[in-house]
Image (spheres, rainbow, N blue to C red):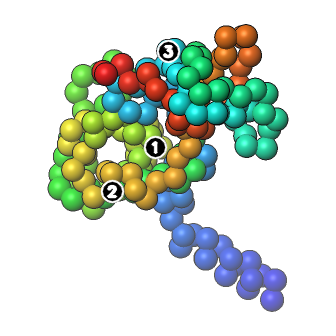
């Protein structure tokens, strides 16, 4: 009986494609240093409301200080944590997928392929996951179904520093002067 169960188990797991699980991005993927919209820049920002600032990137961590309305502060860096990647279905063949230092697309994607949006970068561009690697999208993927990111769940944590030199993290979007384009 044990032998039959063992054989059944081996048969069951061999029928489950391991490559599918490996094609998915890891849970809570962290995009370090990303400023996720067009012309986004970490620099001196202004609080547009009271903003709680946490010790760590967790709502459960202690609030170490508050930024107050109209207070200027330094936005130092950020992390976009992708809890659930957006699913982008390729509907026509396209050459896309850029990596740092190479000016031409690295992928030939076919209709039916799926890529996973990790973080928007603005103007229809984003970081995406495909078969275990991260790429920056070009214009070819911007019109694909799912490229709007509506199916994704992402949290943008910003590391900030007040005038007293205290540092912490917030997810608030109640600030101005992050857009260097105006």
Q: Position of residue 77 (x, y in %)?
A: 56, 22
Q: In the shown orientation, is residue 7 left or right of residue 157?
A: right
Q: Which numbered mark, 3 or 2, is in the foreground of this view?
A: 3
**Does dot 1 land on a helix, a strand or a loop?**
strand
Residue at (82%, 35%) from the top-left corner? 62
**Closer to us: 68 or 110:** 68
Q: Position of residue 7 (x, y in %)?
A: 69, 79
**Closer to us: 100 or 12:** 100
* C-alpha separation, residue under disc 1 versus residue under disc 2: 12 Å
The residue most toward the top is 164
Residue located beneath label 2 in the image = 146
* C-alpha separation, residue under disc 3 versus residue under disc 2: 31 Å
Task: Tell me if residue 20 comes above or below residue 80 in the rendering.
Answer: below
Q: Is residue 22 visible?
A: no
Residue at (54%, 58%) from the top-left corner? 21
Q: Which numbered mark, 1 or 3, is in the foreground of this view?
A: 3
Q: Is residue 35 visible?
A: yes
Mark 1 and mark 2 lie on one chain; the one further toward the N terminus is 1
**Does dot 2 land on a helix, a strand or a loop?**
loop
Q: Position of residue 84 (x, y in %)?
A: 53, 54
Mark 3 and mark 2 lie on one chain; the one further toward the N terminus is 3
Q: In the shown orientation, is residue 78 left or right of residue 94?
A: right
Pointer 3 local density, CA inside 10 Å: few below 14, some 14–19, many at least 20: some
Task: Tell me if residue 100 comes above or below residue 18 in the rendering.
Answer: above
Residue located beneath label 3 in the image = 43
**Does dot 3 land on a helix, a strand or a loop?**
loop
Residue located beneath label 1 in the image = 118
Q: Quadrant of the C terminus?
A: top left
């Amino acid at each position: 009986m044990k032998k039959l169960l063992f054989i059944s188990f081996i048969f069951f797991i061999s029928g489950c494609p391991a490559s599918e699980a490996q094609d998915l991005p890891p849970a809570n993927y962290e995009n370090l240093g990303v400023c996720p919209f067009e012309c986004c820049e970490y620099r001196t920002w202004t609080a547009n409301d009271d903003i709680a600032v946490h010790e760590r990137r967790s709502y459960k961590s202690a609030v170490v200080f508050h930024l107050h309305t109209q207070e200027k502060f330094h936005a130092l860096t950020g992390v976009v944590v992708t809890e659930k990647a957006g699913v982008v279905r390729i509907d026509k063949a396209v050459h896309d997928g850029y990596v740092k230092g190479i000016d031409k697309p690295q992928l030939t994607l076919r209709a039916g392929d799926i890529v996973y949006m990790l973080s928007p970068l603005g103007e229809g561009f984003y970081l995406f996951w495909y078969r275990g690697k991260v790429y920056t999208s070009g214009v070819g993927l911007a019109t694909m179904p799912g490229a709007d990111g509506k199916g994704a769940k992402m949290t943008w944590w910003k590391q900030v520093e007040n005038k007293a030199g205290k540092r912490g993290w917030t997810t608030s979007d109640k600030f101005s002067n992050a857009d260097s384009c105006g």
